[in-house]
Amino acid sequence: MLRGEEMTTGQKTERKLSAILSADVKGYSRLMSDDEGHTIKTLKEYRNIMSEIITSHSGRLVDAPGDNLLAEFSSAVNAVQGSVEIQKTLKARNDELPDDRKLVFRIGINIGDIVQDGSSLYGEGINIAARIESLADPGGVCISRNAYDHIKNKLKLGYEYIGEHSVKNIKDPVRVYKILMDDEDAGKMIGENKKSFLKPLAWSTVIIASIIFIAYLFVQKPAVPEFEPASIDNMAHPLPDKPSIAVLPFDNMSNDKEQDYFSDGITEDIITALSKTSKMLVISRNSTFTYKGKAVKIRQVAEELGVRYVLEGSFRKDGDRIRITAQLIDALSGHHMWADRYDRDLKDVFALQDEITMKILTALQMELTDGEYALISAKGTDNLQAYLKVLQAREFFYTMTKDGLLMARRLCEHALSMDPKYAAAYLYLGSTHFMETRIGSSKSPQDSLKLAFEYVTKAKALDETYASASSILAFLYVMRRQYDQAVAESERAIALEPSSGAAHMWMSYVHTFAGNHEEAVRQAEYAIRLDPFPIYWWYRGLGSAYFSAGRYEEAVAACQKALRSAPDDIVTHLTLTTAYSWAGHLKEAQDQAKEVLRINPKFSLKEQAKKSLYRVQEDGNRFIEGLRMAGLPETNEEDR
């Protein structure tokens, strides 16, 4: 159970309003690596000190796993007084230690509604406190606006308003204040607007004068684009009637190029988050990653992908710290709409992804429903190490090789040993077994498909909002000839991630085999609009959809595109063969039939018919008949 979630047990539960203190150690992993024995000894000493101070301020220590500490107070005043005393006491102790031995805590405080179940606490009030803690300086204290309102006139402290921050699984941003603990800062308020001393009439004069002055500047000096704007006339695809965006791969600025998986993972997670609203058109990973490592102009990206907005950024990792820069660009105006730099602890990466996503949506004036907010914030785990293992697994999975799939499987298993309820780890684990059957490396395809279904079903059970799990599960249902379930799962995936090119392509495959031909074409065409530079099996899927709909010339063109990047894909050759036959190009069909026999000398129509996934028998018969017209053999020696 993640901290901050509600639960119900057999014990009596109580809902109440409390002040929550959340604390952790900066750079704990590095300290443990450098000197585990000293770190554990010092941590125990400091935890005892903190516990005594909490108790002396009428608080209760709730939990202290690892380097974390959670405490409850009935009063915000007591919580803040206790946290300030803790930091001052620990500072005095740290001053006696060398820099590489100091244990420096960060503290976050929030007042919120919580649920007490026995001695344990749950609820979003705790979640907010933990996220605020991550914004505090080492040795510092940050508090929420709720806590600030309770203490601002009661304690001799200073405060600095550090803005609104998005919090995982919380709809509205949280206003956060930093405690200024030095005696000379008492009474200060930095960063928050004071009440104006101007009278209403004076304000009106100032506003009118400002408007006139700004208008004058625009007349005298029109805004000059910061770079060459994109041209609507040169767009490879028409712009939609809603905001359209491409998220370019974040540049890995770390000295260690092996950190590419991390920067790629952050990019992909932002793409996925944006894809969860139907109010945008979001270009898929396959296409934006074709620009990775290339010096391209924003104009080129916008025109080739058919989008108005482009997000680009960079990533740098240094020990337990990460620095991310991001900027949102309007390619049509030639101006930057928003840019920011974030210096955070590595473990804050989840909140940081949410913050960047929300900044983009705010800049584009997207108004989300409550459900969309919840979907965008969903991450599946709070275990950073498990998350990093899955990011690495994802990179190996994309190689689509035997060794890559095996490595991805091991990494997913490792992630599950850290977080047994991590849905993404189960999804990629199941997907490795599924893809082994597609690339022909499985020793027992039947067993592999059984494991794939088991793991992907587990992923969906753990996270009902996981669109990718529903998409893959839909095709696994097709392979089981359970077409109604397949259609239902694919529709669910689209509802969860409307701008996911992959979800639309999986749905196209489902409708192709379920017999819904025109819907299959519509879904495939939209998938390729979302992914203008797709991997081969998207064009293969488009070709299959066109074939099933009787649009044979279009099926030929789509399959030819697929073969440019996967010349030995036998499924594409089979689809192209039968499409040529039905289009009346018998010579080309016969040439393709030779390619099929080159790749698989044991091919037979009898065996192919057994593998048919078509729900409608006429569709399956038409596919086989086209292969027969091209001269492919009915049986082989093994069939006999």
Image (cartoon, helix red, strand yellow):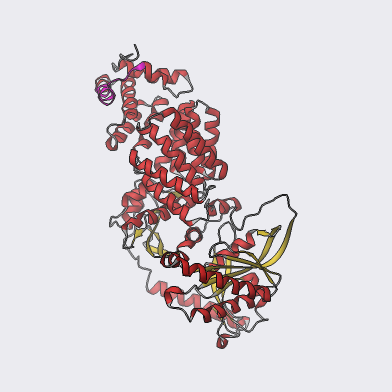
Where does the image place residue 24, in percent across and percent down from the top left? 54, 67
Q: Against 433, is 56 above or below?
A: below
Q: Against 154, is 353 above or below?
A: above
From which residue to which does the magenta span run? 591-605
Q: Against 523, is 343 above or below?
A: below
Q: Is residue 394 visible?
A: yes
Q: Is residue 530 visible?
A: no
Q: Residue at the top extreme?
A: 640
Where does the image place residue 188, in percent across and percent down from the top left? 58, 84
Tell me, yes or no, whether the highlighted magenta stretch contains residue 599: yes
In the displayed structure, does residue 376 sit left or right of residue 597? right
In the displayed structure, does residue 582 sit left or right of residue 105? left
In the displayed structure, does residue 148 sit left or right of residue 578? right
Q: Give 265 or 556, whichever is nearer the viewer.
A: 265
Where does the image place residue 505, in percent across and percent down from the top left? 43, 37
Tell me, yes or no, whether the highlighted magenta stretch contains residue 188: no
Q: Give 2 or 629, whichever is nearer the viewer.
A: 2
Q: How many marks?
A: 0
Quadrant of res 222 = bottom left
On-image quarter of the C terminus: top left
Where does the image place residue 519, in percent across and percent down from the top left? 48, 32
Identity of the residue drawn at 57% across and 41% down: 461
Q: Give 54 or 477, whichever is nearer the viewer.
A: 54
Q: Give 633 or 28, whichever is nearer the viewer.
A: 28
Quadrant of res 171 = bottom right
> Which secondary structure type mostly characterizes the magenta part of the structure?
helix
Quadrant of res 314 = bottom left
Q: Against 615, is 119 above or below?
A: below
